[in-house]
Image: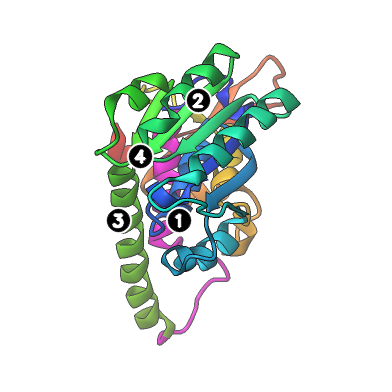
């Protein structure tokens, strides 16, 4: 759940390739976007090792910079030291407001504590096997298993939508506007849930900012809509209400997810 004001935090996302699964990097980056804007995105590992070679496609897709760290000694994880040194350099640069540490390794416990002592927001992301000291050292800790579940649901919805679209493609189109794909509806619903847990609704402008953080190429025009409000209103799942402001000529749109009410 996002706290007020957090959407403007500049975040450094640092990933321990030795202790993070590669099959849900996209969802990890979307999760990080809930808490701010990732301005530094780095992943640490020995990229000469064939065991980490499978990261390449995911790194390109999510614009994450790989940092080479050779394993100088067998049985020792030199990735930890490189990531910690970089984190401190970034801290002293003053270019970020918080850190997202992606690892299940308790060796980063002291780093999380030190960053928080410096006034940084620290978000931890790791598997349920993560030792408790690292978990409690963070302001917030999210389990990879939860993120992976959301990712799997999105992929299943995407496949179902593709099958449905294939059937519809055989029929003549009656409108230039496309029906919103299932994964887009889920993206909007998840983002509404991320931004509120009450009945006051979510301001459309804030929702739009989060959608673009999660998916930089998100644009209502891709689906035949001129505005995000028109796009959201096209789905029966969402309710949109325009609230008056101090200016009688201006109203602000707010959105609810009917299935969450």
Residue at 46% in and 29% down: 123
Q: Which residue is mark 2?
A: 111
**Mark 4 → mark 2, Cα distance in angstroms:** 13 Å
**Residue 178 coordinates in the image, percent (x, y):** 51, 67
Magenta range: 170-195
Q: Quadrant of residue 84?
A: top right
C-beta proximity under 8 Å, tags 1 and 2: no
Quadrant where the N terminus sits is top left
Side of 259 relative to 42 (left or right):
left
Residue at 54% in and 49% down: 44
- Residue 153 shows which numbered tag? 3
**Mark 1 → mark 4, Cα distance in angstroms:** 30 Å
**Mark 1 → mark 2, Cα distance in angstroms:** 37 Å
**Residue 170 coordinates in the image, percent (x, y):** 40, 87
Q: Nearer the viewer, mark 1 or mark 4?
A: 4
Q: Earlier in the sequence, mark 3 or mark 2?
A: 2
Residue at 43% in and 20% down: 139
At mark 4, the secondary structure is: loop
Residue at 31% in and 69% down: 160
Q: Earlier in the sequence, mark 1 or mark 4?
A: 4
């Amino acid at each position: 759940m996002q706290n007020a004001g957090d959407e403007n935090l500049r975040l450094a996302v640092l990933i321990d390739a030795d202790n993070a699964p590669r099959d849900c990097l996209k969802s990890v980056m979307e999760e990080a976007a809930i808490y701010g804007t990732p301005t530094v995105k780095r992943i640490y590992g020995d990229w000469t090792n064939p065991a980490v070679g499978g990261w390449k496609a995911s790194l390109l897709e999510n614009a994450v910079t790989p940092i080479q760290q050779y394993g100088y000694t067998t049985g020792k994880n030199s990735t930890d030291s490189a990531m910690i040194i970089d984190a401190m350099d970034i801290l002293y640069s003053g270019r970020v407001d918080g850190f997202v540490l992606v690892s299940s390794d308790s060796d980063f416990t002291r780093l999380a504590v030190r960053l928080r002592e410096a006034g940084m927001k620290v978000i931890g992301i790791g598997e349920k096997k993560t030792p408790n000291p690292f978990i409690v050292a963070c302001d917030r800790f999210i389990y990879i298993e939860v993120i992976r579940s959301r990712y799997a649901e999105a992929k299943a919805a995407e496949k179902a939508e593709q099958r449905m679209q294939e059937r519809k493609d055989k029929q003549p189109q009656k409108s230039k506007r496309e029906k919103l794909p299932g994964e887009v509806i889920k993206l909007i619903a998840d983002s509404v849930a991320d931004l509120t847990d009450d009945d006051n609704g979510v301001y459309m402008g804030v929702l739009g900012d989060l959608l673009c953080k999660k998916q930089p190429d998100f644009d209502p025009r891709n689906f035949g809509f001129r505005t995000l409000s028109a796009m959201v209103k096209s789905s029966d799942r969402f309710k949109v209400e325009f609230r008056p402001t101090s200016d009688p000529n201006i109203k602000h749109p707010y959105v609810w997810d009917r299935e969450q009410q």
